[in-house]
Amino acid sequence: MPLSRRALLAALAASPVLGAAAAKPKGFVGVADGKLVLDGKPYRFVGSNLWYGAWLGSPAAYGDRARLGRELDKLKSLGVTNLRVLGSGETSPAKVAMDPTFRGPGEDYSADLLTGLDVLLAEMAKRDMKAVIYLNNFWDWSGGMPAYLNWTGNGTWFQQGDPAHPWPEYPDYSARFYGDAKANALFRHYIKAVVGRTSTVTGKPYRDDPTIMAWQLANEPRPGGTEAFGVANLPTYYRWIDETAAYIKTIDPKHLVSTGSEGAMGCLERESCVVEAHRPAAIDYMTLHVWPNNWSWIDFKNQPGTYEAGEAKCREYVTRHIALAKGLNKPLVIEEFGLIRDDRAFTPGAPATYKDRFYQTIFDLTLADMKAGGPVAGTNFWAWNGEGRAQQPDAWFKRGDTHFVGDPPQEEQGLFGVFDADVSTLAVIKAHAGAIARL
């Protein structure tokens, strides 16, 4: 059961390592003077999203540890040293949801996927990589918050994209999760199991593993979708962030904790919401996602004609959030950003003129801020497809597919991800990694 607020505060008061100024053991990423640090030096990185890492590491038939090793080697050769990975997944009736998953409504969590996470972390440690592990999802492609609501009977369950429940009904529904005590009791039991886990590969408790940079509350948690529901839900949303982050710290005080927020676009377009969501002492750094196609800043169907104006909005969006991070005196990680290839192609190696330009834009903003001594610590592009390929002719994920790519089941396999054949994009990533290494 969840700790009471009083018990949480008492436990945290007794913790010697909570807070931005706390010293970290050797090899652990920490925070000092509003920046990420590692062993007394600035910690800067080029990273990727690899949500399916635990699936590849699993001993089950869908696992592929040989591929996992090859993907990590390829990423390391590009200069990628930080991976944002999924450490959860809930059984869901959604047609586009992952299967298998880490858990159902009971406490019999998947030994195969938990072992897969152990393997992933062990293989990353061999390559001196750091992991950010998110523990829930606002979106239902991994089950996520709607799966918990389905288990507790909180409203009529429906999947994202259901025409009978047009947007923004979905974000209002998913955001009920924060105030659902039963759902959060289930979630906290899972948090305790994962954050308090001991690796079956290394024999080391997760809390003692410096391979983990941070635990993350969820992928893109939002307070809601409509103004009416979202604003009314803000106090509950803030409280959930504060108390869940603090709860993680009671289990593991050595690692950082982050929200997984997109920034203002995932916070009712309010900068005040971003600030309040990242203000708690147990939240160590700010996160930011940049999705110009999905936000209609750059048109899926007319990328050439809308790119310039969309890129300008992206620059301004990043700049605004750098200022917010400075105001909070906390580091900032641009942990998701993506753009489609030319003509919305899914084919590995297809022309990526604007995608490459967009990556370069984010990388240039990042490098400039690092040189200026700003709060930006690194980036994680979305996402690494590597040698994965769509298994279905229409490029949509089908339950049982095992050729995992970075594009989740809710979208075409290849829409935003970076394949090992995307030569021009790989060159942009590698060049940026080299520039950071020379700082």
Image (cartoon, grey):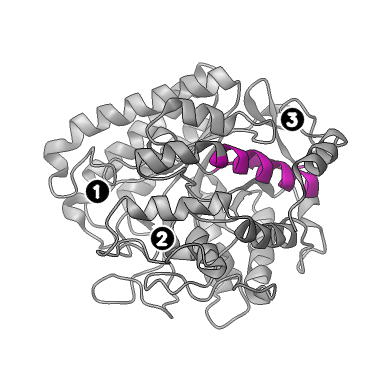
For marks 2 and 1 on the same chain, the one whose residue lies earlier in the sequence: 1
Residue 192 percent across, percent down from the top left: 74, 58
- Stretch of the chain drawn in magenta: 236-259
For marks 2 and 3 on the same chain, the one whose residue lies earlier in the sequence: 3
Of residues 275 and 195, which is closer to you in this image?
Answer: 275
> What amino acid is labelled 3 in the image?
Gly
Residue 439 percent across, percent down from the top left: 55, 25
Residue found at x 37% / y 73%: 95
Give the label on residue 352, or none: 1
Residue 287 percent across, percent down from the top left: 51, 37
Of residues 187 and 77, which is closer to you in this image?
Answer: 187
Circle 3 residues within 10 Å: few <14, some 14–19, many ≥20: many
Q: Are marks 2 and 1 in contact (CB under 8 Å)?
A: no
Circle 2 — which element?
strand
Q: In the picture, residue 398 is in which quadrant?
A: bottom left
Residue found at x 82% / y 43%: 7
> What amino acid is labelled 1 in the image?
Ala
Residue found at x 50% / y 37%: 234
Q: Is residue 242 visible?
A: yes
Residue beneath disc 2: 385
> What amino acid is labelled 2 in the image?
Asn
Residue found at x 58% / y 62%: 88
Q: Residue furthest bottom?
A: 61
**Residue 249 lies within the magenta run:** yes
Residue beneath disc 3: 19
Circle 1 residues within 10 Å: few <14, some 14–19, many ≥20: many
Circle 2 residues within 10 Å: few <14, some 14–19, many ≥20: many
Q: How many marks overall?
A: 3
Q: Is residue 278 above or below residue 430?
A: above
